[in-house]
Image: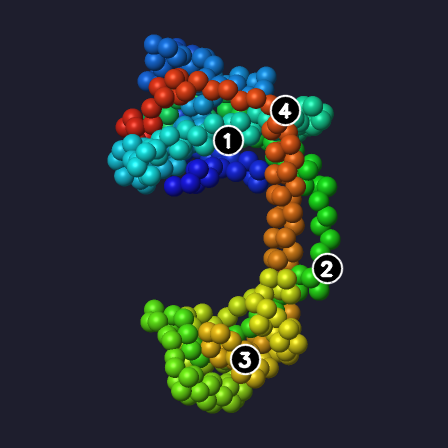
């Protein structure tokens, strides 16, 4: 398991802060002051880590612990947190590392936002408060040990809202101009008579010279038949040695052997036989201009640019803030307690 397996990327989107299915009327229980997560060395208000000038208590960390456990305890096997994925490090250790990274990102982004005078509007702040209240009201009784009070969750929601706003600020500097020609997507159907590699049945193919000649003749026959078909895709599915028979691509991300040919074809036009290292291809233009896929491609390129810009900005900010955490205290936060109980 890689470290990023558990990460809820702050660089791209806000943490998925969703409640459970049943409500608890009074989550902010002032009478209960202890938790099964407390130890003789650590109470709910104990500072377990710090990022820059921001200190993080056990209580705040428990919010992130709850998020992970509520997401996975119901579906994963018992004692999953003790499982050692690579023989050395447990799933619990990976989860804790990702919680630290998540909190570190949030704290750095929010402190940088203050430096840059980026603040939530009153409306944005109120929206975070409303969502926090809804979240807490939807917590089941079994979540009480985490002490996820409304004030705590409100603070976390506001931090994530501010982090998202900083993302939007950086994203707003990105060039979103993508020409139609650059983004244009073409969809083709194709049929392959394979001469080498692995066919759609998983069989290794390595034809001799004589067999390649026969394969070329077969391809020529199929090409003539394809030109008479009203449904090229069905024809390809019944005759191709490849499992897939369609592809969509642009000038910038398509297979070199097909790009020039594909973009010069008209609707339903069938190409000549194209000889490649893996065999003989026959193409059919299904959509010379796929408008929906073109728009989707533009959106994807813009998102990639925004993500890259924010990632670079974050790496620069990160150098200005030191993160310290108590490994001793973190080790005392158990994940392998009884799984959360869900009320259906």
Which residue is at the front of the view, 267 or 18?
Answer: 267
Residue 342 image offset from top left, x and y in percent: 33, 34
Point out the image quarter for the C terminus. Answer: top left
Give the residue at the far left of this rendering. 78
> Closer to the observer: label 1 or label 3?
3
Q: Earlier in the sequence, mark 2 or mark 1?
A: 1
Residue 49 drawn above or below residue 301: above
Q: Are the two marked residues, 4 and 3, in contact with CB atoms closer than 8 angstroms?
A: no
> Closer to the observer: label 1 or label 4?
4
Q: Which residue is mark 1?
A: 102
Is residue 274 found left or right of 302 in the rendered image?
left
Query: What is the CA distance from the residue labelled 1 to the residue labelled 3?
Result: 50 Å
Q: Which residue is mark 4?
A: 320
Point out the image quarter for the N terminus. Answer: top left
Q: Earlier in the sequence, mark 4 or mark 2?
A: 2
Residue 127 drawn above or below residue 265: above
Q: Earlier in the sequence, mark 3 or mark 2?
A: 2
How busy is the neighbourhood of tag 2: few (under 14 within 10 Å), some, or many (20 plus)? few
Q: Which residue is mark 2?
A: 179
Residue 240 image offset from top left, x and y in percent: 43, 78
Q: Quadrant of residue 321?
A: top right
Tag 4's secondary structure? loop
How busy is the neighbourhood of tag 3: few (under 14 within 10 Å), some, or many (20 plus)? some
> Closer to the observer: label 3 or label 2?
3
Which residue is at the front of the view, 319 or 119?
Answer: 319
Tag 3's secondary structure? strand
Residue 296 image offset from top left, x and y in percent: 61, 57
Q: Earlier in the sequence, mark 1 or mark 3?
A: 1
Which residue is at the front of the view, 200 or 123?
Answer: 200
Kindly identify the residue that appears in the image at 58 percent across and 72 percent down. Answer: 258
Kindly identify the residue that appears in the image at 36 percent across and 15 percent down. Answer: 38
Q: Which residue is mark 3?
A: 274
């Amino acid at each position: 398991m890689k470290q990023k397996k558990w990460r809820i990327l702050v660089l791209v989107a806000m943490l998925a802060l969703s409640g459970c299915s049943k409500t608890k009327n009074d989550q902010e229980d002032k009478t209960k002051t202890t938790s099964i997560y407390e130890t003789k060395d650590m109470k709910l208000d104990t500072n377990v880590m710090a990022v820059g000038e921001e200190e993080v208590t056990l209580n705040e960390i428990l919010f992130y612990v709850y998020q992970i456990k509520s997401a996975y305890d119901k579906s994963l096997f018992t004692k999953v947190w003790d499982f050692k994925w690579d023989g050395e490090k447990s799933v619990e250790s990976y989860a804790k590392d990702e919680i630290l990274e998540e909190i570190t990102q949030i704290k750095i982004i929010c402190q940088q936002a203050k430096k840059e005078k980026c603040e939530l509007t009153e409306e944005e702040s109120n929206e975070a408060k409303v969502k926090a209240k809804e979240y807490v009201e939807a917590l089941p009784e079994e979540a009480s040990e985490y002490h996820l009070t409304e004030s705590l969750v409100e603070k976390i929601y506001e931090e994530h809202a501010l982090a998202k706003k900083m993302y939007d600020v950086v994203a707003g500097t990105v060039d979103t101009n993508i020409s139609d020609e650059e983004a244009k997507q073409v969809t083709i159907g194709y049929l392959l008579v394979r001469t080498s590699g692995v066919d759609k049945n998983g069989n290794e193919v390595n034809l001799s010279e004589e067999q390649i000649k026969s394969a070329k003749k077969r391809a020529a026959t199929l090409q003539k038949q394809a030109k008479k078909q009203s449904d090229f895709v069905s024809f390809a599915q019944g005759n191709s040695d490849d499992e897939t028979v369609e592809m969509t691509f642009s000038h910038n991300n398509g297979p070199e052997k097909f790009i020039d040919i594909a973009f010069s074809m008209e609707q339903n036009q069938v190409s000549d036989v194209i000889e490649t290292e893996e065999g003989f291809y026959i193409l059919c233009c299904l959509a010379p201009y796929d408008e929906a896929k073109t728009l989707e491609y533009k959106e994807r390129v813009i998102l990639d640019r925004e993500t890259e810009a924010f990632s670079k900005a974050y790496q620069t900010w990160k150098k200005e803030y030191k993160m310290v955490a108590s490994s001793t205290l973190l080790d005392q936060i158990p994940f392998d307690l009884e799984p959360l109980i869900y009320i259906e």
